[in-house]
Amino acid sequence: MRCISCNGRYDAGTCKKCHEDLKKCHEDLKAKVAFLTTSQPDSFSDVVLFAADGGYAQAAVPVPAHKAVLVSRSPVFNAMLENEMEESLSGIIKIRDVSYGTLRAFVNYLYTAEVVCLDQQLACDLLVMAEKYQVHHLKDLCQKFLVANLNWENSFSTYTFVHQHNAKKIIEAALTLIIDNMDKLTAREEYDELKEKDPQLLFEIYEAYLSKQVNKAAAQKGSSASHPPKFNWGGMYFEDDDEVQDYD
Amino acid sequence: MRCISCNGRYDAGTCKKCHEDLKKCHEDLKAKVAFLTTSQPDSFSDVVLFAADGGYAQAAVPVPAHKAVLVSRSPVFNAMLENEMEESLSGIIKIRDVSYGTLRAFVNYLYTAEVVCLDQQLACDLLVMAEKYQVHHLKDLCQKFLVANLNWENSFSTYTFVHQHNAKKIIEAALTLIIDNMDKLTAREEYDELKEKDPQLLFEIYEAYLSKQVNKAAAQKGSSASHPPKFNWGGMYFEDDDEVQDYD
């Protein structure tokens, strides 16, 4: 049978009615998202955010917003604004160590649930902001983007970066990629740098690799079926099929 | 083949991958709607709405809201609030001829795109508000609800009600239902009432019925295939298959 959607042949799928019902719900949800998207964050704003790239010396450009939207999207803004802290009284929120572009994209996301022109750098910057302000929906989006765009070239930098931001999904994917290419590890530019700057991180890579090798050897001896793996690294067991599995 | 969704047999449909891709997008949209839904319209509100059931004598209960949300969802509120009219300056919007319950449901819809406990009466009341404030997304919802809940009992009252509110989809559906049961027309309680109160509306029903009968007769003589229908009513042509079709 041929699929009415992709025209490919298949032997398991859904009937036209179920597919069309889902498509109908999907269109309804799209209209709902469009309806709920607020296109004018500048209108009647009662708070402004300022980005501070390491200091407030330069004339910062304000990013207008609404307290109601900020508290609704982020528990951190909620605590800050509902409890009449300095920011709530002054209507000014200064955000350190972030560029104007990132702040603008972050605030825009709170109104639209969309990021225009997302790239590797912006995804990393927004991940940090999403983590800090507990905007889980945005954090998920950045994680998905970084995992989808992971390659051997950026695996090392992504791994070292996300390691500080509790982004488990990316850590696992990057580590798998690094371990699958261990033969090229010491030849990498970042290797010597990391040995100096963050030896612990390098040890974690080696330990994860070792765990995988030991489990592989055990599996080859036929003992893996009846015994649990002998090595594990940070809750992740490395198994024979070269896949990282999380048993937490 | 059996559908993996409803388990029914079918001979045309989509493959598992296409279905799962759509399901995935659907889940993403659901999360987006949840993210964009503002749950606290009371927080940091800068405007209050009052319902006025025919007068302002009674102590009205305020419904708090945000100008930014109102202008984003309704072009009427946008014109009212952006142009510094009385309502914008005072932060008070009085809405005549609406109950507190309807106003509360209306404002809640602007924040959540949902109506809790929608029934026939509320759907009619919200349709009027949606029409007045040009909230098309809500008007669509009310129209769909009223069409889905249309029956012989409420067809007459629904028809007379929506006739004043430019709700074309419901007018067509109600008229079809009435015309399909013309033999019971004069026996209806509302018939004599309508003859007195709104004879024009009754003439429209009769004219639509006549148009259908004439076209049916013409079709039976075998002339409908080569000639266009001779009668039409308000842009709607009544054809042989008893279906109302809109050719506008």
Image (tube, coloured by chain):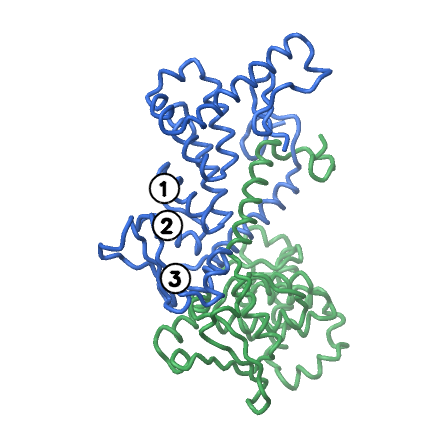
Chain colours: A green, B blue
Q: Nearer the viewer, residue B59 or B29?
A: B59
**Residue at screen point 52% across, 53% down:** A35
For residue A165, which quarter of the picture?
A: bottom right
Query: Label 1: how many residues lie within 10 Å, few (<14), some (14-19) or many (20+)?
Result: some
The amino acid marked with disc number 1 is: Leu
**Residue at screen point 68% across, 9% down:** B222
Residue placed furthest toward the bottom: A57
Q: Nearer the viewer, residue B6 or A49?
A: A49
Q: Which residue is mark 1?
A: B122
Give the SS element for disc 2: helix
Q: Position of residue A22 (x, y in %)?
A: 56, 39
Above or below for B58 versus A194: above
Q: Nearer the viewer, residue B216 or A145?
A: B216
Q: Position of residue A52 (x, y in %)?
A: 56, 84
Above or below for B127 versus A94: above
Sequence-earlier tag: 2 or 3: 3
Q: Which residue is mark 2?
A: B105
Residue B197 numbered tag: none
Name the image quarter holding the N terminus of chain B: top right
Q: Which residue is mark 3?
A: B65
Q: In the image, A185: left or right of A227?
A: right
Q: In the image, B241: left or right of A65?
A: right
Tell me whether the residue at label 2 lies in contact with that at label 3, contact meaning CB atoms closer than 8 angstroms: no
The amino acid marked with disc number 3 is: Ala
Badge 1: chain ID: B
